[in-house]
Amino acid sequence: MNFIGVDLGGTNIKAGVVDEDANLLARVSIETQADRGPEHVLERMAQAADEARKKAGLKWPDIAAVGVGSPGPMDGKTGIVLECPNLPGWRNVPVVDKMQQKLGVTVYLENDANAAGFGEYWKGAGQGATCMIQLTLGTGVGGGIVINGQVWRGIDDCAAELGHMVIKYDGVRCGCGSHGCIEAYGSATALVRIAREKLDAGRPSILHDWVKSGQKLTAKLVADAAHQGDALAREIYREVGTYLGVAIASFCNIFNPEKVVLSGGMSQAGDILFGPIREEVNRRAVAPAARRVQILPASLGDDAGIIGAAGCAMQRYKEGRRV
């Protein structure tokens, strides 16, 4: 059997055909065109799925089901996306019903971070784990939890909002409205904020020259400076890594996972990020859990959401679920 995974993003829609062994047979990426509203985006999602099918040389009867990974809170029991901040007009959008009408096959809805987490568990860095935690370090911090081969979604499909665990009760305000969330201290956005604050305070760094020359201050730029031995850049990554280590230590104490997988551009920073994380986990987590856990960079890149959405659809299809 073959399945299609659709990864809905604010900028691009990615879709791919995946077989039962998690092999990605074909993939496509098209612009979301989110400003044209939900109905247009749904049409684009159907188009991406169909293009992936054609690219794989398959007919629709060869596709058992389609999985859609979408951002935003959702009701997985009805297949409705309740709200999606990065997609204008997305409130109570019946994604499953609309996509089934357009494609004529069974469609399942999944949170995009859950899908990416399952993708890494099924085919990526999380393979072989009984319990795996995934964190996506980007504009925000997304999360996914896989236990005994199943995504942990919670009773209201609101589980694994790991980026909004509070690690500093009097900390800076997060985009969710709370204060001191992991997202406010451990995301790429947070790293850039911390770097800008230190540069504005007059701290010496090669970053001053790079920014003045027209380069944009990003997490990658800070990583490049750190790899060249820039003391301030290394300090910034140590600070952010420590915050992430505080959070991951708590995850270790709660879930006792074998693997914690970090994805997103920051995960490519190497030891300047993973070193402080591991140090803090060893310092804070209970000793058996700290010894057990492997903290690893993700391996699937942009394909994690596609493979994971297809994999979650496969599981539900085989279990005979309607949604």
Image (spheres, rainbow, N blue to C red):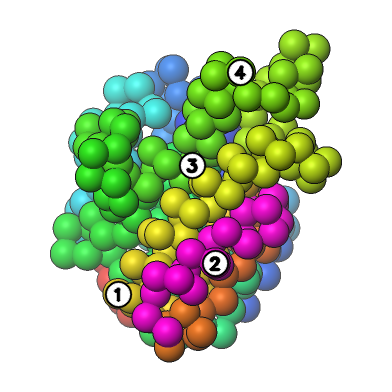
The residue carrying pointer 2 sits among few (fewer than 14), some (14 to 19) or many (20 or more) residues within 10 Å by Cα, namely some
Does 48 appear above or below 40?
below
- 292 vs 29, nearest the viewer: 292
Point out the frontmost of discs 3 and 2: 2
Determine whether 224 is above or below 22 in the image: above
Which is in the foreground here, disc 3 or disc 4?
Answer: 4
- Say what amino acid the circle numbered 1 marks: Ile
Q: Earlier in the sequence, mark 3 or mark 2?
A: 3
Check if mark 4's residue and mark 1's residue have beta carbons within 8 Å: no
**Rendered location of residue 116, percent (x, y):** 50, 58
| Residue located beneath label 1 in the image | 254
List the residue tagged with mark 4.
Answer: 202
Tell me the residue that label 2 is attached to: 279
Q: Which residue is found at the position 46% from the left and 45% from the top? A: 186
Which residue was labeled with disc 3? 187
Q: Amino acid at mark 2?
A: Glu
Query: Can you name the residue that lies furthest to the right here?
Result: 228
User: Foreground: 111 or 168?
Assistant: 168
Task: Name the N-terminal-most of marks 4 and 2.
Answer: 4
Q: Write down the region rendered in magenta.
A: 267-287
Q: Amino acid at mark 3?
A: Ser
Q: Residue at x 32, y 59 (%)?
A: 160
- Label 3: few (<14), some or many (≥20) within 10 Å? many
Mark 3 and mark 4: Cα distance apart in space: 23 Å
